[in-house]
Image (cartoon, helix red, strand yellow):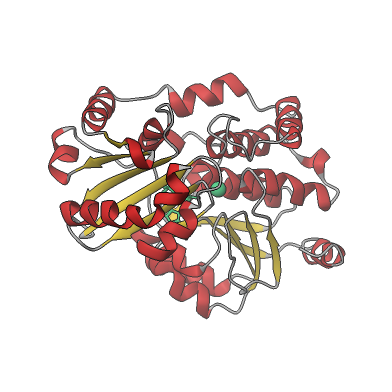
Amino acid sequence: MIKTQIPELKTLLSTPQDIVIVPHKNPDGDAMGSTLGLYHYLKAYNHKATVIAPNDYPDFLKWLPGDDAVLIFESNRDHCEALINKAQLIFTLDFNAFHRTGDMAVPLEQSSATKIMIDHHQQPDNYAKYTYSDVSMSSTCEMVFNFIEMLNDVEKINADIATCLYTGIMTDTGSFRFPSTTRRTHQVIGDLIKRGAKNSEIHNNIYDTNSYSRLQLLGRAMQNLKVIPELRTAYITLSQAELDEFNFKKGDTEGFVNYGLSLKDIIFAAIFIENEQDNIVKISLRSKGSFSVNEFSRAHFNGGGHTNAAGGRSEDNLQTTVEKFISILQQYKNELSQ
Ligand code: 5GP
Ligand code: MN
């Protein structure tokens, strides 16, 4: 966002507006934390703001302040479309292209509302009048903090806003350990704690509310872990039958891919998860160092994301997808074996 746009935005936000706030499909902690954090901020100015998530999200996010007011597009289409059509402003958070919202992309594209994008993914589309895009940022939540600061409103950050923003920074940085975590990130975190984010409680709500079956599924995923040492790559598969066996619920596989990356000398990790309902294999990719999983996913698996964390999908079956992955890897021998 160009600095000169800030006074303009401040004026725009100085009278109550109809506002819709949108995270990406399959929202994660950063997507829900940033949209709900912004929601509480806008509420303080008496805007009519609604968070509309493209689809449902995991239970471990359902305690966030304001969660009960979130609408799910997939299960309430007519009402959500009416709100989108009526909106004067639409904030799109934690994604870089309308197609990342699934079916919601159509009403978003058709809407005449002024769009504001806040996002840290690479190669953002150019649909917003106000684009605040910064790929070096740890999280969209850190950017929402910056956004509020640019509007000269840090003092308006209350415990609800602080809790939401803390959550997304924590989840997107892997609890403050990924390289995107900066001194500034910790300063923002310190400020959020000062303003009422209960750090230990938040960590507990997100990470220590596992079901027994999720841990059993993790056990199976670890048994399925394969390593290709010469390419410093590790990958995991989970079939639909295995997911069913362990009573899979949305969010249960969150973070599994990182275990591959925790192996000594491994710099590239993948997980392939069969989804019979959508007839796809969902892929998550992680890397360490300069190997770009964003580029890898864009080139081969219809996806994208960041240099060190990206997602994608395959319409082949699980076995074919994994075989394709292994054969493609050979092209990256030089980069991976260094
Ligand atoms: P995850 O593997 O946790 O689903 O996603 C990792 C990162 O890549 C997240 O920042 C997520 O928003 C992004 N991402 C996941 N799937 C896709 C996709 O299909 N396309 C793009 N462009 N980004 C994705
Ligand atoms: Mn994010």
**In the rendered view, would you say 86 is above or below 238?**
below
Instruction: Give the image location of residue 67, x and y in percent.
Output: 50, 42
Residue 25, by quadrant, is bottom left
Q: Which quadrant of the figure contains the N terminus? A: bottom right
> Along the line of sight, which residue is nearer the eye, 95 or 309?
309
Determine whether, in the image, residue 288 is placed left or right of residue 223: right
Using the rendered image of the protein, determine whether residue 299 is visible from the camera's viewpoint. yes
Determine whether, in the image, residue 161 is placed left or right of residue 194: left
Residue 298, by quadrant, is bottom left
The residue lying at 41 percent from left, 65 percent from top is 299
The residue lying at 16 percent from left, 52 percent from top is 319
Instruction: Give the image location of residue 227, x and y in percent.
Output: 29, 35
Using the rendered image of the protein, determine whether residue 27 is visible from the camera's viewpoint. no
Instruction: Give the image location of residue 178, x and y in percent.
Output: 58, 35
**In the rendered view, would you say 336 is above or below 281?**
above
> Along the line of sight, which residue is nearer the eye, 7 or 228?
228
